[in-house]
Image (cartoon, rainbow, N blue to C red):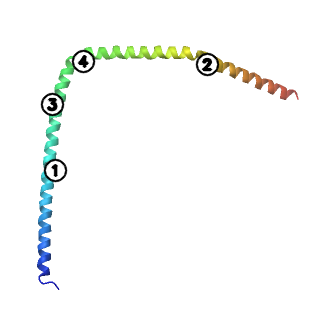
Amino acid sequence: MLPNLDLFLLAFLYGSFIACLVLAVSFAIMNGLLLAFSLALFSIVLFDVQDVLSFVSQYFLPLEENLKLGFILFLYTVMDYGLHATLASKPVVERLVFELKVKARHLMDHIEASASY
């Protein structure tokens, strides 16, 4: 057996306890600093947002009218492209309808021929 093994174990446990306490205290300090930094950053952001909103509120009515005009122009552009696409696809649709009519006519002829037997 090793002499003074119990003293070595006691010293190891004491050192582990001290290290655990130091680690817990440093963890608490780091969390406190992180919380303080976050609160400071959040308050700075709130003050900046308040300044920006007070600046924008002066120009809100012209901004609202400009947004309405922009939406109307966007809607006009979309409708214009949609109209051109519809007019360009009209021959394709007419061809599909004609093919459908031909197939329906063939089907009706086939049904009439089957019924006459």
Name the amino acid, label 2: Val
- Label for residue 31? 1
* Residue ID for mark 3: 47
| Farthest-out residue, front | 2
Q: Earlier in the sequence, mark 3 or mark 4?
A: 3
Label 2 and label 3: CA atoms lie apart by 59 Å
Q: Residue 5, image x and y in percent? A: 14, 80
Q: Are marks 3 and 4 in contact (CB under 8 Å)?
A: no
Question: Which residue is at a point 13% across and 55% down the rendered structure image?
Answer: 26
* Residue ID for mark 2: 93
* Residue ID for mark 4: 60
Q: Quadrant of residue 71?
A: top left
Label 3 and label 4: CA atoms lie apart by 20 Å
Question: Which residue is at a point 11% across and 73% down the rendered structure image?
Answer: 11
Q: Residue 3, image x and y in percent? A: 12, 84
Q: Residues within 10 Å of mark 4 (few under 14, many from 20)?
A: few
